Amino acid sequence: MTYLRLFITFFKIGLISFGGGYAMIPIIEDAIVKNGWLTPADFYNIIAVSETTPGPIAVNSATFVGYRVAGFFGGISATIGIAMPSLIIIILISTYLFKYKDSKVVENIFGWLRPVITGLIIVAGFHVAKTSLINEGAEMSIPFNISSVFNIKGLIIFGLTAIMLGKTKIHPILAIVGSGILGVILFGFF
Amino acid sequence: MTDEKNRFEFLFEMFMTFFKIGMFTFGGGYAMIPLMEEEIIHKKEWMKKEDIMDLFAVSETVPGSIAINTSTFIGYSLAGGVGAITAMVGVVLPSFLIITAIAAFFGAISGNHMVDAAFLGIRCAVVALIWKSAGGFFKSSIKEKKDIVLLISTVLILLFTSIHPVIVMAIAALLSVLTFKLKSGDSV
């Protein structure tokens, strides 16, 4: 019964949340409180783990909540629940999308959406920067003090990665592994 | 017989590719773009940059996780319904396994100083990775003046207001249809 309730709850969340994993967090919190599944403090820990571990935040938090509420199969129920609406919606849309993809109107719409998507990606970079390159609670002051606003060690890792990406054909995975090691050295030991 | 075998091999290759992408995506759906570019556009040459951008645009406008949506879309366009399921399971599975292991054995991974340090380092690099992808997308999406206006307005609106990205996309789509109607009305 709990499995079914987890499935239905996360299916609903997958169905109504627009804008990806981050947009889901308040909706998941709401559902958890309503069902009395976890305490808010527990939930924030789960979100912190979901944000740092690899993979989509939506899947991470669904799996984690499901596991905490009802063990291994609870994790499976919640994960399938959150992914299922995407699968159904996308298979439905694809049928139409690929049919009308070459129509002039649709082509024109995508021509307008591509610059918007580029903008969204730039902004996504800013959001990640806020949790890594910029110090928590930093405020702009005069005289401008660079080390109080920016995380200098973070800037070093960012700069090195940017140079490597610009000068070499380094694989993103290698950049991620390398920066993890640099992170341990710079933030862990110093 | 061989067709059957080739199809299975292709699906398996696709599964492994998305598994790899899911495994190394840190920091939400957008962080997946550099990996998808490298694996799907450059290495496997399954799709072109414009195609992925369009699927990404649609993924953004429908509900659900952007990472799952994009993977499912790519899977569908490469190998139909079975492809959609294969890509989705591939991208979801690493998360599921890692989180289940954490929930079962460690309780909470954050709080460990060294693990936090590694993740902080990774996030710094992810900023560079995301912006590099944005640079590539810039080149293939900015063709005329209106494109640069669209890009700058999007960035400003999202950084300084609380307007939802889906609204921005809906307005852009609406404007495109309106101007298209006007233009084609003129030429007739």
Image: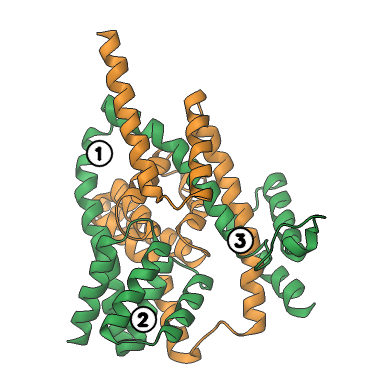
- x, y percent for residue B3: 26, 50
A69 or B156, nearer to the observer: B156
Of the numbered discs 1 and 2, the one sitting upstream in the chain is: 2
In the rendered image, which quarter contains the N terminus of chain B?
bottom left
Left/right of residue B80 with respect to residue B125 in the rendered view: left
Answer whether residue A75 is visible to the viewer in this image.
Answer: no
Q: Colour of chain A?
A: green
Q: Residue at x 57, y 53 (%)?
A: A125
Answer whether residue B30 is visible to the viewer in this image.
Answer: yes
Which residue matches tag 1?
Answer: A98
Q: Residue type at mark 1: give it.
A: Phe
Mark 1 or 2, closer to the camera: 2
Which residue matches tag 3?
Answer: A130
Same subunit, labels 3 and 1: the answer reads: yes
Q: Residues within 10 Å of mark 1 (few under 14, many from 20)?
A: few
Protein chain holding label 1:
A
Q: Any idea which chain is the orange one in this picture?
A: B
Protein chain holding label 3:
A
Which residue matches tag 2?
Answer: A65
